[in-house]
Amino acid sequence: MDLRGVVDLLSRHLYSSPRVYVRELLQNAADAITARGEGEGRIAIEVHEGSPAGLVRVHDNGVGLTEDEVHTLLATIGRSSKRDELGFARHEFLGQFGIGLLSGFLVADEIHVETRSVTGAPTVSWIGRSDGTYRVALSPAEREEPGTTVTLRARRDAAEWVDERTVTELAALYGSLLPGRVSVNGVATTVEGPPWLAAHDTPDARRAALLEYGRQLFGFTPFDVIDLDVAEAGLTGVAFVLPSPANPTARATHRVYLKRMLLTERAEGVLPDWAFFARCVLDAGELRPTASREALYEDDLLEHTRDQLGRQLREWLVKLAETDPARLRAFLRLHHLGVKALALHDDDMLRLVDRWLEFETSDGPMTLAQFRTRHPKGRFTSSVDEFRQLSAVSGAQGVGLVNGGYVYDSDILQRLRRIDPDVGLDRLDPGELATHLGPVDPGADLAARPFVTAAARVLDPLGCELVLRDFDPASLPALYLTSRAAEHQAELREAREAADDLWADVLGAMERTVAAERPRLVLNHRNPLVRRVVLLKDLSLAATAVEALYGMALLHGHHPLRAADTAALNRSFLGLLDWAVLGKE
């Protein structure tokens, strides 16, 4: 075979970096120790820095190999049936014994293996070269105990990967949780098992230790730590809740071990997408790695694991609501987007949002449960601009309003009937708000008729009707209200004007079948300026003032301005400016 081609494939397309050779050598050594199944496992790495490049030796006291096994396992690639017969594909192994040795060619042109089997067979020497040739012979020096030593002499261009500092860091990174002892030049790099399985005197001491572990690992002090356990995947671990808001569009990554060997620090898809507020450290025995052993294989077990981990995060939130409401509120201030996303398809989370999460309302910030108690027939808006325009008016008329313009809010408000069918909230149609505004005094209404007639002539070309009402707040002179039906008609009209003749006829027919309904400019007779405008004797000046009020209402409500609207606004501004100048002269 063309081994150089295989090495190029490994280095350029399978592995992300030559550093994985340390992981693969540790993996083979750990599997050899597992295969022996007796005594205390030891993996000792020796690093000898030199010129032009260094040398790395990896010793283990594992099962070792006989000469026949060396030929079968180290001189061929992918012969899984033979490997199974010899017992080197057992379930508890981290990988395929011997195959990982190929990664040594990422940093060296020659790999030397000295191995002695626990069966008592003599020590065997195997030397493989990157050109695809190898040599097997009995070793002239007998090993004192069973096990294997792998020696790599780095190429000149790979010297950076075999210096003592780099090898020590990689050994600690990949093998810190491995059972047994791993050392580099006599210095241990392993810890006493996964920190989340360590014994502590009290729950508080355990929590403090895990929070410190999270700080060292991720660089932040977690808001909280959550235990994770999925028996089907042989999984244990912890989730650390971020202490600051997370970007929901950013892909969360997690630290995943397989049988205590680090798989990756950047695993994706371990938690549901809505759980972007957590970072996990997991050790699993049953999940499958990809061919590069740098990610998890997407299968039914991983999907089940993801669902179970999401369920456990959800249970933590529910428990927090029951036992520590103040802490839950602090969490929601940080990560409300994740909880809202979950509430869209989970009734328990919907209840939690309803009870604990504050929304912007016309009565100020409050929870939906509080708002619904105060306003059983309340409404919500689907945009922030609409809420800002109408909240003061609706609140003054006793119509409670919730701002549903932020992400997920409208969908959550529409789902409330799933948990409380009797007091759900409906979306506000701005057109209906006019029915809640008080009528003008009959005497004032009679005196305003000439003004209303003149104003109607001005607004008619703009597709708008004038309504005179008396309402709070008195500081608001004019309000532009358009119903859903009026908006639909306006869209049809704009589409008809932009279409060709054929589609214009079709859209025109559709427009004629819809009951005519126009937006309304509601003038507030309670406003002092409006009262003065209504009583103007100069009706042309009154008409100019109406155009100005119309333009101001559009701008205040953040409504889009058509060409006709912009022209009316400019015309009114220049007309009032001209009148002011002439009046002073």
Image (cartoon, helix red, strand yellow):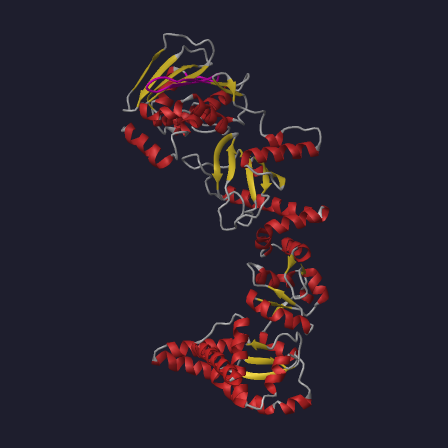
Task: Specify whether residue 283 is painted magenta.
Answer: no
Which quadrant of the structure image shows residue 346? bottom right
Which quadrant of the structure image shows residue 48? top left
Position of 533 relative to 127 (above/below): below
Residue 166 at what x, y percent from top left? 43, 25
Q: Is residue 135 left or right of residue 528?
A: left
Q: Nearer the viewer, residue 563 or 507?
A: 563
Q: Nearer the viewer, residue 535 or 296?
A: 535
Residue 210 at what x, y percent from top left? 62, 34
User: Residue at (55%, 17%) from the top-left corner?
Assistant: 40
User: Residue at (38%, 76%) from the top-left corner?
Assistant: 498
User: Which of the image's four quarters has the N terminus?
Assistant: top left
Task: Specify whether residue 51 is painted magenta.
Answer: yes
Residue 555 visible here: yes
Residue 31 at what x, y percent from top left? 47, 24
Q: Residue furthest front?
A: 585
Position of 538 relative to 184 (above/below): below
Residues drawn in magenta: 45-65
Task: Give the total of numbered labels.
Answer: 0
Residue 167 at what x, y percent from top left? 44, 24
Position of 306 relative to 99 (above/below): below
Q: Nearer the viewer, residue 230 or 512?
A: 512
Residue 517 visible here: no
